């Protein structure tokens, strides 16, 4: 049995009641294509494929917690809400989902909706926030919208749902809930510290972070007694496809393709990758875009491995769609220290030696391989893979 992952979805007071009562999560749908302002050149939109990479990291059986964002909401309403679990593959469906007329009260779903498309022009692109008013506005017809457009979805079922949220102070700084087995919620905290683009609609939290939220729910929050779940049934769901378009040299057009492919396939025993990951049933955690610093420093992919109840190693994978550089090798020293702290709780040499760095790129010049061989940082010697696209998949060759 694989370990269940745990993920936090950002929602607000308009969407949370609908997600809870109709049992699904949704993420935004930016345009798949972006157009360069100066040249008019079209290319795949990294924002779209980055979100898709986040979504395809989910597996059936994973836990879901919602984080209800502060907007104009009172501080007592915002916070973590849960607990649910994933029961479907991710999919696209642009049907609108209504709340339930029987779900009333301040956080009832009656009269609320999550849209799959604009009710005026029919676009399934997610709304944007008006620069002045912050109101939701359709990207295409510019009309004001009352609800979010979230057509990329996954179905969930309740595990145990609580009426009260876990507020931020209890989640992050309450000393009653900071212990050896209840760590600070680092991966969430780094997203909250200010910085452009830091917020993501899905954060893959560590197993101990999930356990901590679970303990706080059980200690502080009232379990809901009057839920009226009515699972939404997708009417015309489409599979989410990650295209692997390359330029004429064979290099992927955007790095997010590589990231999304990796998250979809990391536990599926693909050639070469399976040698690095090992037994997928021992994969305690995997996530993309994992923040480890106040400055927004991140690693592309983190995997944590556990055997016989012991967390014994971690793999950090850095992805480059193009040529690997010496800078990618030098970066290893920095993240090894912080990843050791995040995963093993300290940065002793023993902990640092449990971190396996892996660099993946389109090609690895000899000077990069030689620098990695020297291993000046004294970390675990890095592995280097070159990728190529063929037969509708990504293939790897280990060069170090
Ligand atoms: Zn519209």
Image (cartoon, grey):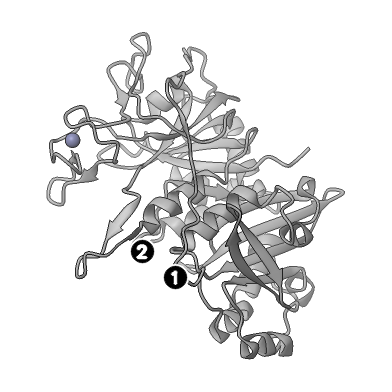
Q: Quadrant of the N terminus?
A: top right
Secondary structure of the residue carrying numbered label 2: loop
Q: Position of residue 128 (x, y in %)?
A: 23, 45
| Residue at image mark 2 | 195
Which quadrant of the picture is home to ligand 1?
Answer: top left
| N-term mark: 2 or 1 | 2
Instruction: Tell me the CA gap for discs 2 and 1.
Output: 8 Å
Crowding at dot 1, Cα within 10 Å, few <14 / some 14-19 / many 20+, comes out as: few
Quadrant in the rendering for residue 304: bottom right
- Residue plotted at (50% across, 53% down): 188
Report x, y in % for residue 309: 83, 48
Instruction: Give the SS element for disc 1.
Output: loop
Kindly indicate the quadrant of the structure image that contains residue 336. Answer: bottom right
Residue depicted at x 63% and y 33%: 60
Q: Which mark is residue 295?
A: 1
Residue 26 pos. (x, y %): 42, 35
């Amino acid at each position: 049995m694989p370990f269940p992952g745990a993920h936090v979805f950002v929602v607000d007071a308009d969407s949370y009641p609908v997600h809870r009562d109709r049992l699904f999560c949704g993420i935004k749908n930016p345009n798949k294509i972006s157009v360069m302002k100066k040249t008019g050149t079209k290319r795949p939109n990294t924002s779209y494929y980055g979100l898709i990479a986040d979504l395809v990291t989910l597996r059936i059986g994973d836990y879901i917690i919602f984080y209800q964002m502060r907007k104009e909401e009172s501080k007592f309403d915002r916070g973590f809400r849960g607990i649910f679990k994933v029961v479907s593959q991710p999919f696209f469906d642009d049907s609108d989902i209504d709340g339930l007329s029987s779900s009333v009260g301040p956080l009832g779903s009656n009269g609320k909706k999550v849209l799959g498309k604009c009710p005026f022009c029919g676009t399934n692109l997610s709304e944007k926030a008006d620069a002045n008013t912050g109101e939701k506005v359709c990207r295409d017809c510019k009309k004001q919208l009352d609800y979010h457009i979230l057509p990329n979805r996954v179905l969930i079922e309740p595990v145990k749902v609580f009426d009260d949220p876990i507020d931020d102070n209890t989640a992050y700084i309450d000393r009653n809930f900071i212990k050896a087995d209840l760590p600070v919620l680092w991966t969430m905290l780094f997203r909250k510290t200010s910085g452009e683009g830091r917020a993501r609609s899905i954060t893959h939290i560590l197993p101990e972070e999930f356990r901590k939220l679970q303990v706080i729910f059980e200690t502080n929050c009232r379990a809901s007694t009057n839920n009226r779940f009515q699972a939404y049934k997708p009417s015309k769901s489409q599979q989410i496809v990650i295209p692997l378009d390359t330029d004429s040299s064979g290099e992927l057009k955007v790095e997010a393709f590589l990231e999304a492919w990796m998250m979809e396939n990391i536990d599926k025993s693909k050639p070469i990758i399976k040698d690095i990951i090992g037994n997928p049933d021992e994969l305690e955690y995997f996530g993309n875009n994992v923040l480890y610093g106040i400055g927004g420093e991140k690693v592309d992919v983190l995997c944590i491995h556990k055997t016989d109840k012991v967390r014994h190693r971690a793999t950090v994978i850095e992805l480059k769609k193009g040529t690997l550089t010496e800078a990618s090798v030098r970066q290893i020293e920095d993240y090894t220290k912080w990843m050791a702290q995040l995963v093993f709780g300290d940065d002793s040499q023993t902990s640092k030696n449990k971190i396996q760095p892996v660099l993946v790129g389109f090609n690895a010049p000899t000077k990069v391989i030689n620098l990695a061989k020297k291993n000046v940082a004294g970390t675990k010697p890095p592995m280097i893979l070159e990728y190529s696209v063929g037969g509708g998949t990504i293939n790897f060759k280990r060069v170090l």
